[in-house]
Image (cartoon, rainbow, N blue to C red):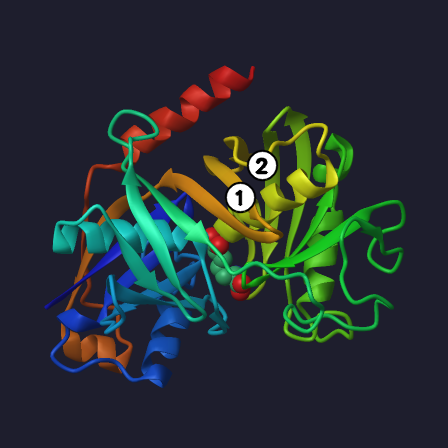
Amino acid sequence: MVELLKVHGSQNKFFILDQTALQNKLPQPELVALAKHITEPEQGLLDGADGLLVIDESDHDGVLGSMQVINTDGSIASMCGNGLRTVSRYLSDKFNQDAFKVETMDSDLAVHREADLANDVPTFSVEISPVTFAKETLPFDHLGTDNLINKAVPEFAPGLKFTAIAVPNPHLISFVDEETMHSKLLGQLGKMLNEPNEYFPDGVNVSFAQILDRNTLFVRTYERGVGFTNACGTGMSATSLAFCLNHPEMADFNQTISVYNPGGMVKTRVHDNDSNFTIDLIGNATFTHKVEIPEEDLHANVLDHAQISETGEQPAYLRFVEGLKRQRV
Ligand SMILES: N[C@@H](CCC[C@H](N)C(=O)O)C(=O)O
């Protein structure tokens, strides 16, 4: 039997598979097929999820393991902030270390255990980098500009300004009012830019942000390869950087920014080292279920014999979310 975990960061939900626990690792086509199946809301397990996080060995210095991110549609993402927190906790528990690095597609990122955000809400801080703005790195095209920082793009939405940032997965961000936040626009734009289109040929994660107060945001994201999620860690990190750059009167570099989202709240800190930006993303790393599956079933992408048990961690997380609602009223 192999044990998978169902986990979440801000209720952005994933399954974790540790390839090192298998007798025979799943080759890439089997991983992609499993990701598409297990995350499917009806045919998958536990109402599906937003992606599969695959842990494997790493031989890099100071690194305890690698993380691969597979979206629900089978596409591969270079990073996942909420997912990285849960993988960090998994590796921290496995190797009994609280500060280390995790290998991701583009870089080895520093992570560490933090004080719990609330009672019994395990919390991790993860580095979000490298950060770039160049159109080739996102990539985008046909917008008549080499970078997009707080610029109007009437083709996307008249009256709104957009910022595009790769962290290193691609994000498109707009600061909006409450009415626009709850309108159909985010869904329409997210869909348009994640279907074949001339602007973002590889698709893009689209976030709308509302400024609630000094160093305080609410962010909603339509994710590439998934659709609407409760939260997107890299999206909230990129949006925090856009907040510091585009609204310096309301946001401070090196200070804690609270980012509320439909799944809860995370904290971010944006650092500017001579325009070399990095972001700390701090939030919950909750394990909700253990899933036991015979290894041969994983290879065959059969989920019928999965044995599922709850970890008992979710009630504490939900109490934390209730507390946030009371704070915001
Ligand atoms: N939910 C993630 C981002 C996952 C990848 C994204 N959909 C992409 O394709 O870039 C996060 O928490 O950062």
Q: Secondary structure at mark 2?
A: loop
Residue 113, located in which quarter of the rendered image? top left
Q: Amino acid at mark 2?
A: Phe
Residue 289, compared with residue 316, is above or below; it is below
Q: Tell which circle, 1 or 2, labels the residue nearer the N-terminal end.
A: 2
Residue 169, compared with residue 317, is above or below; it is below
Identity of the residue drawn at 84% across and 67% down: 143
The percent position of residue 169, horizontal first and vertical second, equals 55, 63
Q: Residues within 10 Å of mark 2 (few under 14, many from 20)?
A: some
Note whether residue 13 is visible: no
The percent position of residue 49, horizontal first and vertical second, equals 40, 56
Residue 183, located in which quarter of the rendered image? top right
> CB of residue at label 1: within 8 Å of ligand 1?
no
Q: Amino acid at mark 1?
A: His
Residue beneath disc 1: 271
Q: How many marks?
A: 2
Q: In the picture provided, is 322 more to the left or to the right than 185? A: left
* On-image quarter of the C terminus: top right
* On-image quarter of the N terminus: bottom left
The Cα–Cα distance between marks 1 and 2, rounded to whole angstroms, is 6 Å
Residue beneath disc 2: 253
The percent position of residue 210, horizontal first and vertical second, equals 68, 34
Contact check, label 1 and label 2, Cβ < 8 Å: yes
Q: In the picture provided, is 159 more to the left or to the right than 226? A: right
Res. 199 mark = none
